[in-house]
Image: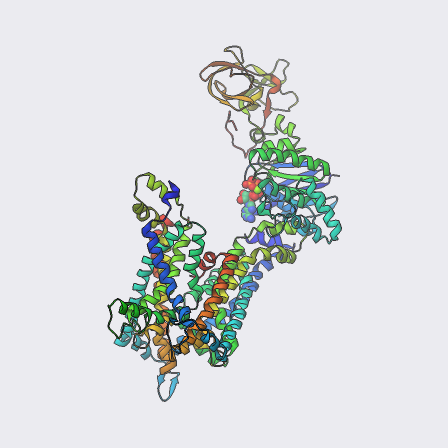
Amino acid sequence: MTETVMETTLPRSPNRARRLERWLPLWLTGPAAVFFLVLLGMPLLMTLALSFYTFDYTAGIEKTLTFTNYAEVLFDGYFHEIFLRTYAISLVTTVLCVLLGAPEAYILYRMRNPWRSIFLLVTLGPLLISVVVRTLGWVLLIGGNGLLSQLLQGLGLAGSRGVSLMYTHTGVVIAMVHVLVPFMVISVWASLRKVDLSTGDAALSLGAKPFTVMRRVIFPQVLPGVLSGSLIVFALTASYFATPSIIGGRRLKVVATSVYDEYLSTMNWPLGASISIVLLLLNVIIVMSYSRWVERRFRRTLGEG
Amino acid sequence: MSVDSRRNGRLALAFHTLFVIFLMAPLVVVILVAFTPKGYLSYPTAGFSLRWFREILERPDFIDAFYHSLNLGIVAATLATLLSIPAALALARFRFAGREFLNGLFLSPLMIPHIVLGVAFLRFFSEIGIGGTFASLVFAHVIIVMPYTLRLVLAAVMGLDRETERAAVSLGANPLTSFRRITLPQMLPGVAGGWMLAFITSFDELTMTVFVASPSNTTLPVKMYNYIEQTIDPLLASVSTVIIVLTVAFMLVLDRFYGLDRVLSGKG
Amino acid sequence: MSFLTLDSLTKRYGDTTAVDALDLSIERGEFVSLLGPSGCGKTTTLQMIAGFALPSAGRIVMDGRDMTDLAPNARGFGIVFQSYALFPHMTVTENVGFGLEMRKIAAPERRRRIRQALALVRLDHLNDRYPRELSGGQRQRVALARALVIEPPLLLLDEPLSNLDAKLREEMQLELRNIQRNVGTTTLMVTHDQGEALSMSDRVVVMDQGRAMQIAEPFRAYEEPADIFVSTFVGKTNLLEGQVAAGDNGQPCVDLVGQRLDLSGAGVVGAGPVRVSIRPERLEMTACRQGLVDGKVQTRQFVGDHWLYQIDTPVGLLLATCPNCGPAGFDVGDEVGVRWTPDSMRLLQDRPRTTLSVGGVS
Ligand SMILES: Nc1ncnc2c1ncn2[C@@H]1O[C@H](COP(=O)(O)OP(=O)(O)OP(=O)(O)O)[C@@H](O)[C@H]1O
Ligand SMILES: [Mg+2]
């Protein structure tokens, strides 16, 4: 392949062509590579280093090697709770996104234009709208005198003080599902587009009921979309900041908000850095092992071919 | 039979309706509250008022933040696109040592939580003495939006018929002319789609920017977040409504231009 | 001195030799086809002439000028690509005008020549369409107009018709040939369709594994195939095994069930088995015991203008055709005789690299 490239576009002399063939890709990727190595590599390495420094409330950050930050993150019950809460919220959010997003993608797929394009826009559009705005909407909905509370009061289901889902797990999960479910829809949608819908007709012609068709024929074919959507949702929730911070507040800390607090309130950067590094590693480990598992499990039946 | 079997049943449509209500409710509520005539959070039960929209004009800090976000989005998206075009050409057309590594490097920001990027940039930029500057915001944003531009540009390069380039050369075009007149125009939809996705991602970014922004260089999401931390009043709703309207307009353009589902498949 | 000369042109990709010392001379105004099975090096040959692939060895000379190392954009050849390679973001007019623009030809002159070229391919009504708004045949004609409008000294066509359906393809073959005759451009076309090559070309180059096996007019390549490969690749044939024997006058001859082919001019030495080719249409079917050899009809196929029979005989499975003049003369299972005349027999040399079984029908 390389050879044809060179021969089409580049000078005649074989030696010059060969030299260019070697150097051209490096020139082309060079600027981006330097940019990334310096502006992504360096900051991450510095944060790694920072996570081993000591911190003292009076002396500030000191460049002495220590493992106490990691010891604190890994063995302190306070952080255990935060990590557990974070991953529990992620898990519940992911399950809800599957239950809501996958059927919705299928329904969208069976719609006809113009409804299909309209509702696709309605479903995916929120992804582009600022997370702060969307979360604010939930604050207005589920807060102390929000619509939800008024609704429940009107139905006589709540006392005169109303109900607030602010600073509760339920509130955080509802808002997170709202923020992330479009990712599930788009992921399932992408794999639905590759499905030949006449396989469903084939199953019907063999006597299957519509629900069986969906469960036995369509769903297995879109499973890769569901799985990759779940990974996206899970990984994003586990490190999400805006929504848990606004709705969960200080009372319901998750990993991302505790990093924020270490950095910008307590000013204990080394501890914040080690929480970040743990979060990053967990994220990478989860993504990698999940992808590997999915690949092994489905390579034979649903491989890219 | 196939037409009917592919119709949504009543149950499915009920589900769909609830789903759409769920998605739209917070946005609708924000828009409603923005029109309240009262001085506190409430629904405009007693008539609509534009007082909170007028209030925005009295708040130069919000307007400045909006322009900062706009500039930042434009500069970061453009820079990321300019870096992505040559990189995508090299990744798509050559097999060279380090190709896999570079591909992974350019896409890695997708795997790194933004909160981690935020603290990393905070430390780095203050160490090298550019903390809080517009340049530092640009650098940070280029890193997080480049995976999106690269993916869409890469898809455009891969989908391009190489023989059209040969045809141009056979008709007398030199390599540069062929690139400018044949290759680049055919890549344009992907490049434009990538730019737009990058722009909106940068415009909306909060988590990382919270750490990098400074009071003099703050973006609209950061400004709003900090405001929410203090108090929640209808001003936030009216600002949000403006954002929603602008984003929807932008989205319609993007959908027309490139197909929203195609762009967003690149976002995950 | 011929117009275009390929002088032992060779292309190696690592261990594989895609084109192996190809010699070819083309006269001005001639239409030559490169014909051969998939992977035999046709495209590679064309790419080297076009300048898109550098030859590993050999030279390309046009009009006395060595072109071997010339950049492809300096050659000025017209090329029609297999996929047409129309510029999708340009209209028909812009596509056709691109080469003229590269030659910095002034706009009025450019418009005139575009109009002329589009008229030539009968597309003057579709100026402002984009390629995706055209049918396959129309695209192909735009590609042709784009290549012809620059008035190239040499037109290179890489399987230009392979994407078309059978009927359109036949029409385009005629049209392409007419245009080429009218314009008089020297043309080299790649194809793996032997019918196309035979019906369109002044000469065909039959290639196999990077080598030219025979370069001849279509009629000669069909009637006097140079070897077994050519005889089986160009048209269908019966390959039979015969013995070289001494004839009546002491001259060597081949004996095939009593029918003798005089080899006096062929320079055959020694005795032994040889291969003989007889075209199916040269076999005549008769009643039993009326022919040279008897057999039994195994299959019968109707092919429109003729019937195709497979006959099991002691000399092997024979393929015979009968023109369709009314209902078939024979049925499956019939005992029949088969005969032929001595002048329909062709002696063939087996080249070491080709492996084909006796009686094999291509
Ligand atoms: N870039 C390349 N690298 C390595 N081998 C190649 C390359 N291009 C062609 N070949 C090999 O050279 C031989 C001839 O290829 P070529 O494309 O010329 O065949 P062709 O006659 O045009 O076949 P087809 O009728 O299928 O188009 C093939 O064996 C092919 O695999
Ligand atoms: Mg070929």
Quadrant housing residue A233? bottom left
Residue A243 drawn at (x, y percent)? 36, 70
Q: Which residue does the image show at 63% across and 50% down from the upper left?
A: C91
Residue C282 drawn at (x, y percent)? 58, 20
Q: In terms of depth relative to the viewer, which is nearer, C98 or C223?
A: C98
Residue B239 shown left or right of residue A28 in the figure: left
From this view, report whether residue C5 is shown above or below residue C291: below
Looking at the rendered image, the quarter that the C terminus of chain B falls into is bottom left
Residue B72 shown left or right of residue A190 in the figure: right
State which image quarter holds ligand 1.
top right
Q: In terms of depth relative to the viewer, which is nearer, C36 or C252?
A: C36
Q: Which residue does the image show at 24% across and 72% down from the upper left?
A: A159
Q: In terms of depth relative to the viewer, which is nearer, C149 or C45?
A: C149
Q: How is the image coloured?
A: rainbow
Q: Which residue does the image show at 47% across and 80% down from the upper left?
A: B214
Quadrant housing residue B176? bottom right
